[in-house]
Amino acid sequence: MASVFLYHVVADLTVGKPELVEFCETETVEAAIKAIGDSTECGIPVWKRKTHAGIENTEMRQQRFVGILNSLDIVAFFAKSECLEDHDKALKTPVSEVVTHNNSLLRQVDPGTRLIDALEMMKHGVKRLLVRKSVVWQGMSKRFSILYNGKWLKNMDTSSSSNNLGASSNRPSSSTTTSARDKFCCLSREDVIRFLIGCLGALAPLPLSSISSVGAINPNYNSIEATSAAIEATQKLPEDPSAIAVLEQSQDGQYKIIGEISASKLWKCDHLAAAWALANLSGGQFVMGVEDNVSSRSLKDFSVNQAAGNNNLANGGGSTKPKKFSSRSIGFNAANPSLAVSRSMYRGRSAPLTCKVTSSLAAVMAQMLSHRATHVWVTEDESDDVLVGVVGYADIMVAVTKQPSSVVPSPARSTENSAIVNDVHN
């Protein structure tokens, strides 16, 4: 196991992280849409309101955590018939009626928790780590982390006066400690992956091994056929990753991925327009886009609340008027509008993020970070778009914590992966 997991603690990843602002379950879906746009991993933690004043312990805080709400949850909610009929009522719905209740997705940990222990939690389903913001760690070298292993705060309080004299510049005052007692920051799996990609040298040769050789490909994924109704994707929303592949069967009987319906793709889209499309179109039409100049005649008008500024329909402002649906109304835009008529060329923002089974672990990590995606779909090496699996955050964390394999990457692939990682840092 790489020493980077033993000599680093979660406090090393909290530098520069903003203080957590709790999003209460009594807030409206409209407010949640705005908060999700500024979130990581396309979702926000939802909390119950505090019922009493004073300092709460870890168990009390854990019980107040409700779950994580993402864009796919909201679009699936908006796609219900009663929400399509009354947008204003849907936007004013309390978040508690939309979020999936699961308080095991977040775990509060001590700032001195080893990185390897944090990875073990995330491998088993934890998506957020709640870490107390403490100035005790400021100015302390990371190499001391393993010496204390989660007991640094206790050692600071019980150390002798002679030791305190030398460390007085780093120790906060009692008033500062009290004021920071209830201040926390939230670490996501994206934060952990971003940290790990800066430590690729310490993980060598694992990052340059193919994802198939390290067992990072998950063959179990959710999917619907392109000819099926897009609303079928919401019958049972996947938890991790929160994505459904849209597949098209080729003449030889193989299934190729043409798009996806996921929280990451719907992250900053027009949620009301996406909900209408989800309820009325096929999976293929939803992900590939339906252009006004191609097939709008076959589509009915739908009414939305046209909001001012940024043309964000989910804000609930402005007047209501009929509008033709197009891929642009969701936020799926063709890279080259002149090619939009050709489905094979119309990929745009709705195109799924894919890699090959021979892609290296480092390259896939770089893809996820550069696209702010929670997953990458894996296709066959010989045949484009033939889907074989998916790689998510949990799969990467399982792979990097395995014992080093005997797989030796080729020099050509090593050069290619180095270039990709450099692009991410730049």
Image (cartoon, grey):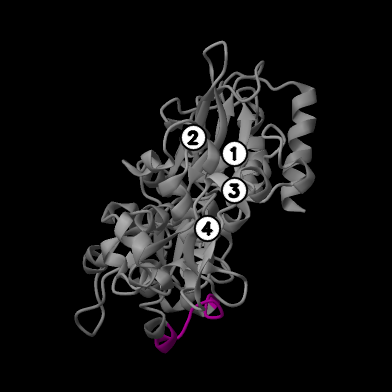
Within-10-Å neighbours for mark 3: few <14, some 14–19, many 20+: some
Q: Nearer the viewer, residue 183 or 1?
A: 183
For residue 144, the mark is: 4
**Looking at the rendering, which quadrant does residue 79 occupy?**
bottom left
Residue 63, by quadrant, is bottom left
- Which mark's residue is nearer the viewer, 4 or 1? 1
Q: Which residue is mark 1?
A: 352
Query: Please, what is the dominant secondary structure of the magenta stretch?
Result: loop
Work out whether residue 196 can be spotted: no
Q: Position of residue 71 (x, y in %)?
A: 45, 56
Going by the numbered disc 4, the residue's amino acid type is Phe
Q: Residue at x 48, y 38 (%)?
A: 283
Within 10 Å of disc 4 (Cα), the crowding (few <14, some 14-19, many 20+) is: few
- Range drawn in magenta: 166-176
Q: Amino acid at mark 2?
A: Ala
Q: Are marks 4 and 2 in contact (CB under 8 Å)?
A: no
Residue position marked by numbered label 2 in the rendering: 245
In space, the residues marked 3 and 1 are separated at their CA atoms by 24 Å
Which one is earlier in the sequence, the residue at label 4 or at label 1? 4
Instruction: Give yes or no for contact between labels 2 and 1 (Cβ–Cβ under 8 Å).
Output: yes
Q: Distance between the Cα atoms at labels 2 and 1?
A: 8 Å
Distance CA(mark 2)–CA(mark 3): 25 Å
Left or right: 284 as drawn, with respect to 370:
left
Which mark is on residue 296? 3
Residue 121: image location, x then y, percent: 37, 46
Report if residue 150 is visible in the image: yes
